[in-house]
Image (cartoon, rainbow, N blue to C red):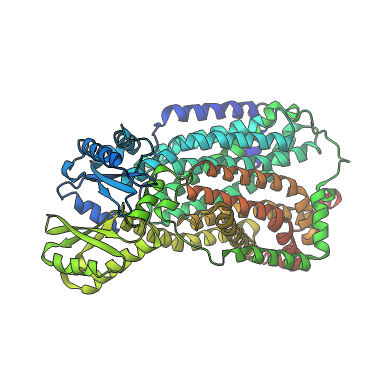
Amino acid sequence: MHRIAGFIAGRRTSWITFVLGFVVVGALFALLPQAGTAPAPGTGLPSSAESQQVDALLKRFPGADRTVAIVVFDRESGLTTADRTAIASRATALAKRSVVPQAVRPQVSGDGRVAVVAVPLDAKPVASDPGAAAATIRGIARTGIPAGLTARVTGPVGFQADIGNAFAGADIRLLLVTALVVAVLLIVTYRSPLLWIVPLVVVGAADGLARVVVAAVAAPLGLTVDASISGIQSVLVFGAGTNYALLLISRYREELRRRPDHHEAMQVAVRSAGPTIAASGGTVTLSLLTLLLGELSGNRALGVACAIGVVIAIAAAVLWLPAALVVFGRRLFWPFVPKADPAAPRAERGVWASIGRRVARRPRTVAVVAVLGIIAMGSGLIGFRFGLSQTEQLLGNPESVQAQALLDRSFGAGTGAQTVVLAPTAVVQQVTTLAKDTTGVSSVAPGATAAGRTELDLQLAGAPASDAAFASIRSLRAALHDAGGTVATTLVGGSDATAYDQREAQQRDQAVVVPSILVVVFVVLALLLRSLVAPVLLLASVLATFLASLGLGNLLFQRVFGFPGFDVQVPLFAFLFLVALGVDYNIFLTARAREERVRHGTREGIVVALGATGGVITSAGVLLAAVFVVLGVLPVVALAQIGTLVCIGVLLDTLVVRTLLVPALVLIVGDRFWWPSRRDTVPELARSEA
């Protein structure tokens, strides 16, 4: 690190590094393929999933490449004669667009307020542009209808269109809003009209480069990077990259107050902060790569994309940013240019050190109060719900959700969902009987026969992708399996079965990835801090933060935002980001405490470390929290929940856990915190400087 720091911050070589950074970034942008992103997330399920087996077998059936748009007409006061005439006319027009014209017939609800028209469509053009398909159907349905009669599109086509609209341009929107948030917070942090530009440009270039590299790597690995993954990647790169920049600049400014030569100051800053940044970023990277152990391809793609982004952010913060800062010199900090003054107040005499000394007076009291507060916040998890139905996954009450609500009220909650059973033709009657006897199955209709199997179309009583629908899928599969023989080879698929398989796969991924993250973080902390006690206490503090965040988040979601529960993806991703990023701040603090321990001992060392890192960690935490809140820009409940939970967790970690609980634990445990390593010998020069 000494040689690297010397080259990066050298009087001449800093210019070489600065220019070389632009050359490398530009060359990679020019040479690597510019692949696009998928507009919306796919199922991500492996081919072994039962619902995916059904999809594969359906390709052999006549008319297999079909989907359906459901048009819902309604008038709150009841359909008039003119309404019904217009609906019949619109059904005739819609039939011309359908692959099964004879099936396009209006059905009127028993209360006379709603009419529904199902329009079978060719699945391929719909899959390529569901928004255009829905717009076409919507336009035909609304042409010439009486005033006061509404026509909305739902069903598979309607929901695909609304999900696609939610993610349309998502990566660009998130990028722009994130960059704006980072710029504002950097200006507030540094109070300089110049300094904020350099880290923002460097981190922005790192994000752009990460997108290009991920696009080049994803295709050969068979991974699909959709707009949600690209958006989360940008948020993470900007958040983590700016955090690393804040840590480096803070140490650089600290050294500028001690040394007249800014080149020498940067060399010391890189030697001191560089390993910490690398260790922190390495922990995040390895934690992200544990997603490769998952079953869902979307989780694996997110892990690879974000890991690449963090590695590039580390390289930019440690190699390119120092050179850029040195090139512009002290004047970059104008109007608050740091001047070399050996008599300037040191970290141990600052505001944060004062907080540390207050903690040191009663560490046990502080620890008990902090733990009780965390337990109180975590109690908000009592009565939480896991999983959202299809209509609960989008914000803003889009058209497909409105139409599905009308169907639920007038025709039954399961109307609009597709459940397909492929039974061996020889036992189709037995399978039909079992299906009709399954709780939650409203109707069973026979379909086409091909390849020795017969298709049965089921309507469930539960709302699409709801707990009730999943219970029906689970019961039906169990009944078919328990029947044994040929009946047991029957497969259950369709939209509800796919959503159920996704939830089960997500839970399996969670069971594998969560302990893997804990192992990775423990090993990294043990190697970095050369201790076995410190990693246990730090991990315990981060886990406590995670549970408290879930508790507060659950209260916020249910009582303020009106979310009925957590989306299935949220616990895993919130755990991943909170543990990995939360450990970041603990690494910043304890790595500095280990450094100061040589001069001051454990007790005074943690106070000095808090004084030295308190300001920058708090600034970094507030910035990271604000950046993750940006995920709420998209009208998708899962992303809004992930962003909110990470925001809550990061603020708790920086303002409570890292400021109060961790120092209190270090003070209570004392030198045993570093066991089995022993305190290094303190040179006389270091003693005199201390």
Is residue 684 depicted above or below 172 in this figure? below
Side of 147 where 537 appears, left or right: right
Is residue 202 depicted above or below 584 in this figure? above
List x then y, in percent, for residue 460.
Answer: 30, 60
List x then y, in percent, for residue 252.
Answer: 72, 38
Displayed quadrant of residue 665: bottom right
Displayed quadrant of residue 443: bottom left
Give the residue displayed 52% in from the left and 38% down from the top. 174
Give the residue displayed 21% in from the left and 73% down from the top. 483
Examine the rendering and report whether any part of residue 334 can be seen. yes
List x then y, in percent, for residue 112.
Answer: 32, 50
Please state which of residues 392 and 372 is positioned toward the viewer in this rendering.
392
Please state which of residues 667 and 377 is positioned toward the viewer in this rendering.
377
Give the residue displayed 51% in from the left and 29% down from the top. 24
List x then y, in percent, for residue 73.
Answer: 33, 43
Please state, as top left, top right, bottom left or bottom right, where the N terminus lies in the image.
Answer: top right
Side of 432 where 573 appears, left or right: right
